[in-house]
Image: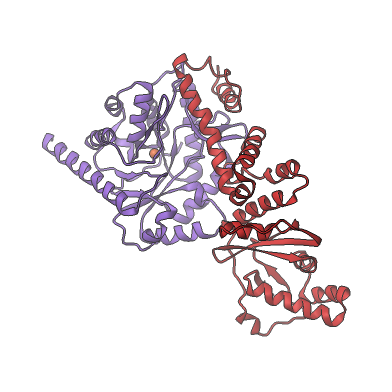
Amino acid sequence: MRTHHLPAFEGFGLGLRPVHYEEILGGQVPVDFVEIISENFMVQGGKPLAILERVRAHYPVVMHGVSLSIGSADGLKLDYLQKLKELAARIQPLWVSDHLCWTGVEGFNSHDLLPLPYTDEALDVVCTNVNVVQDYLGRPILLENPSTYLGYSQADYSEPEFLAELCRRAGCYLLLDVNNIYVSGVNQGFDPFHYLSAIPKDYVRQMHLAGHSQGESRLIDTHDQPVPNAVWSVYRAACERFGSVASMIERDDNIPPLNELIDELNIARTVASVARRSEECLV
Amino acid sequence: MSLLDMQRQFRSFLLDDPNVLNRYVSADAIPGLAVYHYAYRAQLEECMRETFERTWAWLGDDDFHDAIHRYIENHSPTSWTISDYGDHFVNMLDTLHPDSPEVGELALLDWTLRRAFDGPDGAVVTTAAMAEAIDWDHAKIRFVPTLRMFAVRSNCGALWSAMASEKVPPVVEYFADAAAIRVWRDGHSCRFQTIDELEMLAVNYIANGASFAELCGNLAHLLGDEHGTSAAGEFLAAWVGEGLVAAID
Ligand SMILES: [Fe+2]
């Protein structure tokens, strides 16, 4: 295993969504970085790639994928990795991220972020796959804690313990989604603040903020509404623990005008700076 | 129980074997399983609605949803990209609607336009460039890489255009003669054109490597010397005007 160090990047960003293309392309939007869904741009040509290249000329970009399937027991898909590497070479992102999950097995792809059992065996599988990806891409990756809707009866680790051990063993980093922590916490009955305290301080490179909705029996990670107060509280605690980490709002549905997202991002800036000041007081 | 076994069972669960995961999860996880079961289908349905938007408009909600539900039950996704998911839908619609070829043809048009949208970029020959000295005896025409052509029996192109501009579609017509649709991307605009049998032949000649002179010869064979050359010239002028030609070398 080669070790890959990833420098931190501080700032506040938004996801690149087609309804905001024109404004983002103006280059005047007050964001420090832009996140793309990698798969939408792992294409041969046309408008999406042309837009992305213009956006990249104005802003740093981070690549966020949904199809890596880092937890597949039968290994990774090489055609996918090849396309991912091509896009990274083209865009020169700050980093490349995906989720701690599996999406398919033996040629089947569910296109959903399916939960992993947090067992020793799964940890071995994920570590092996992370090593393959990082060596192939020649860069470290970030993995995001997913929203989960069930737990398995067999577990050797809690989710944050699993993530911590994964980072130590495979040398990858974390994209901490504080909404997912909250959603999974409610669904599975754990305390989000307790979760944060089990995450090692040095590996978090990015945070996601988002909204969710109440499903029939579970909170669902819908990304279709503003960040609720409960999630802001988790974010504040995360800022206190992890310091200035690149943070962004994920909005994928019911997408409001860009200025509303900028206003929401300004709340994140305020919460982060209040957290930082209270940390400084403690020091 | 290995991770691989569990993932195989989870796949079976998603593909509708409801109890197969019960030994991996506790009883209170059943509502959580339902979330994944629902999300798998919802995501594929959304993909099909986006990919086959005009087919959906043509069939209406009930028939379209029946068709995509049947498709989802019979086709599990295999590609890393969900944009490949609908690749057998046209065949299924042809089977479901054997006497209404316009249904499958609309779906093929939806599908091909979607492919052109993020297909490969390439240079385009402008009409102005045609004024330059070209050795027409040896010139070869290359089409843009997004060009696709397929035979049609119906006026599906006119149906598609009417629905795209939210107009009342014309009545369905079935052509007496062979016809085709060519689809390509011009800059960032995906375009299509319904063409007759002669142009279909001409496009095929060029796509299979014939030179412009050979195209003239082939068309002369069909239309007579004078008409053959002028038809080839008219086709080429139209193709260049529509952003269909990548190079003349
Ligand atoms: Fe996220």
Closer to the camera, A128 or A99?
Answer: A99
User: Chain A, which colour?
Assistant: purple
Closer to the camera, A194 or A80?
Answer: A194
Image quadrant in which you'd find residue B47: top right
On the picture, is A175 further left or further right than A273?
right
Q: Is residue B151 positioned above or below A245 on the image?
A: below
Ligand 1 quadrant? top left
Closer to the camera, B126 or A4?
Answer: B126
Look at the image and tell me whether residue A87 can be seen: yes
Q: Is residue B65 positioned above or below B159 on the image?
A: above
Q: Is residue B25 positioned above or below B93 on the image?
A: above
On the picture, is A142 further left or further right than A245?
right
Rendering coords of residue B167 (x, y %): 58, 59
Residue at (33% x, 22% y) in the render = A190
Closer to the camera, B244 or B52?
Answer: B52
On the picture, is B39 further left or further right than A189?
right
Rendering coords of residue B230 (x, y %): 78, 81
Look at the image and tell me whether residue A161 can be seen: no
Image quadrant in which you'd find residue B229: bottom right
Quadrant into which the C terminus of chain A falls: top left
Residue at (47% x, 14% y) in the render = B27
Rendering coords of residue A85 (x, y %): 51, 48
Rendering coords of residue A173 (x, y %): 37, 37
Question: Which chain is drawn using red?
Answer: B
Residue at (56% x, 25% y) in the render = B10
